[in-house]
Amino acid sequence: MGPSMNQPLVLLVEDSPTMRAQMTSVLQSLGFVVDAVEDGEVAWQWAQTMAPHWLLSDCDMPRRDGFSLLAAVRQLPHWRNVPCVLYSAEDSPARRLKARQAGAAAWMVKPVMRQDLLAVLAALGIVPHQASETIA
């Protein structure tokens, strides 16, 4: 069963299994349905036929990084208006500019903290549906 109107779908792209599990937990606790994939190439295959409500992607991954993934999906008509957030452990003005040029709506620095994610989502007009208060 797909996401309901009350549970927006987020595509999470993260190559670290530990980070992917942690981010999935946080996103689910906010009421999002999460489709988590391990790299930009898998995400690119996913994106050919589907579009999430929004995308959250690491930048530094094998096979296809977040920058090239975002530049590619922005060429797909059904992805043109999807808010995309890129994040990385490395932060610099050049990387932020590269993210903007690829089509990112926002940039975050690892570790991605829940309160920072909420602030970015608010700025993008994405309203979490906090489905569970018991998940930290």
Image: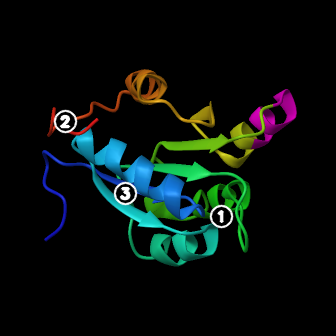
Query: Which disc is residue 52 wearing?
Result: 3
Viewer-nearest residue: 98 or 119: 119
Q: Are marks 2 and 3 in contact (CB under 8 Å)?
A: no
- Whichever of callouts 1 and 2 sits on the residue coming sooner in the sequence is 1
Query: Which disc is residue 72 wearing?
Result: 1
Percent from the top left, x then y, of residue 49? Answer: 41, 76
As drawn, 118 above or below 66:
above
Q: Quadrant of residue 72?
A: bottom right
Q: Which residue is mark 2?
A: 129
Residue shown at the point (46%, 74%) measured from the top left: 46
Alpha carbon distance from label 2 to label 3: 16 Å
Task: Identify residue type, mark 2.
Answer: His
Alpha carbon distance from label 1 to label 2: 29 Å
Viewer-nearest residue: 99 or 65: 65
Magenta-colored stretch includes residue 54: no
- Whichever of callouts 2 and 3 sits on the residue coming sooner in the sequence is 3
Task: Identify residue type, mark 3.
Answer: Pro
Magenta-colored stretch includes residue 93: yes
Q: Is residue 6 visible?
A: yes
Percent from the top left, x then y, of residue 115? Answer: 42, 22
Alpha carbon distance from label 3 to label 1: 15 Å
Task: Identify residue type, mark 1.
Answer: Ala
